[in-house]
Amino acid sequence: MAETILSIKDLQVNYGGIEAVKGISFDVPQGSIVTLIGANGAGKSSTLRTVAGLVKPSSGSIRFMGEEITGKGPTDIVKKGITLVPEGRRIFADLSVLENLKIGAYLRKDDIREDLNWVYSLFPRLKERAWQAGGTLSGGEQQMLAVGRALMSRPKLMMMDEPSLGLAPIVVRDIFNIIREINKRGVTILLIEQNANMALQTADFGYVLETGRISLSGSGSALLTNEAVKKAYLGE
């Protein structure tokens, strides 16, 4: 059994009077791909944003590689080895592709060339467009750039919020192939994805969130064949 890289216990997240996450607990094994699926407003993004240090939890515990990281700020979280590829990509539109990638490595003091070459090998299109402004790229290329930028900090855990949102089906397939490739290089992945079918096909393990609580969990393949999941999320 793989060691746990991320452990979340009784996590509660409130926005004003609204309970977005209602005391969830789950583990992410090292080297795995884990997905959270659920309808909009189920608390998936709030969970990722809390782990990333962008939102302070009301209560509960987040442990990363055995260390308590609850309530730490985003810079500390990146230093520990966690990155977030945010929903909507959030690249710097006026900066070049290369400048965007370098921003991903802003905390590093070592040579980044090896990682830059790895990102270019995953996404040859980014190499071709290295000097182009990020805002001139297509949606799919911007998603590649957002993933590449996250990889430049050499994460141990990469969290991805809706990587396929608004992309053509062929590009979605490419992105998921690359997610598997990144995982093979030893990066653990925690993924939120509206395309539940694709997410569960890719993930080793999945959790179903409903209105801030975990209602189901199991291997990706088990959830794919679960009748309740099929009905609610796979359009069957």
Image (cartoon, rainbow, N blue to C red):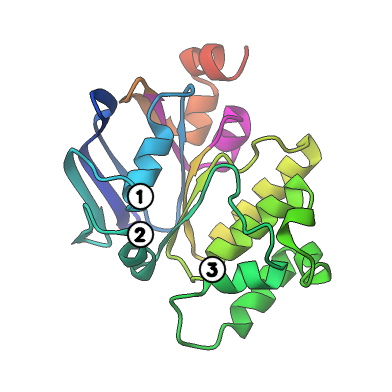
Residue at point 49%, 75% (across, down)? 106
Q: Is residue 181 among what the camera can see?
A: no
Residue at point 52%, 74% (across, down)? 105
Task: Provide the residue designation for mark 3.
Answer: 104
Q: Amino acid at mark 3?
A: Gly
Mark 3 and mark 2: Cα distance apart in space = 13 Å
SS for dot 1:
loop
Q: How far across and down, in percent of the image, does residue 178 sit?
A: 66, 55
Viewer-proximal residue among 78 and 222: 78
Q: Residues within 10 Å of mark 1 (few under 14, many from 20)?
A: some
98 sits left or right of 10 in the view: right
Instruction: Check if residue 124 falls in the magenta segment.
Output: no
In the image, the segment drawn in magenta is 193-209
Mark 1 and mark 2: Cα distance apart in space = 6 Å
Q: Looking at the rendered structure, which numbered label has been put on residue 74?
A: 2
SS for dot 3:
helix
Q: How far across and down, in percent of the image, does residue 131 sit?
A: 78, 72
Q: Amino acid at mark 1?
A: Leu
**In the rendered structure, which disc, 1 or 3, sits on the residue that comes first in sequence?**
1
77 sits left or right of 158 in the view: left
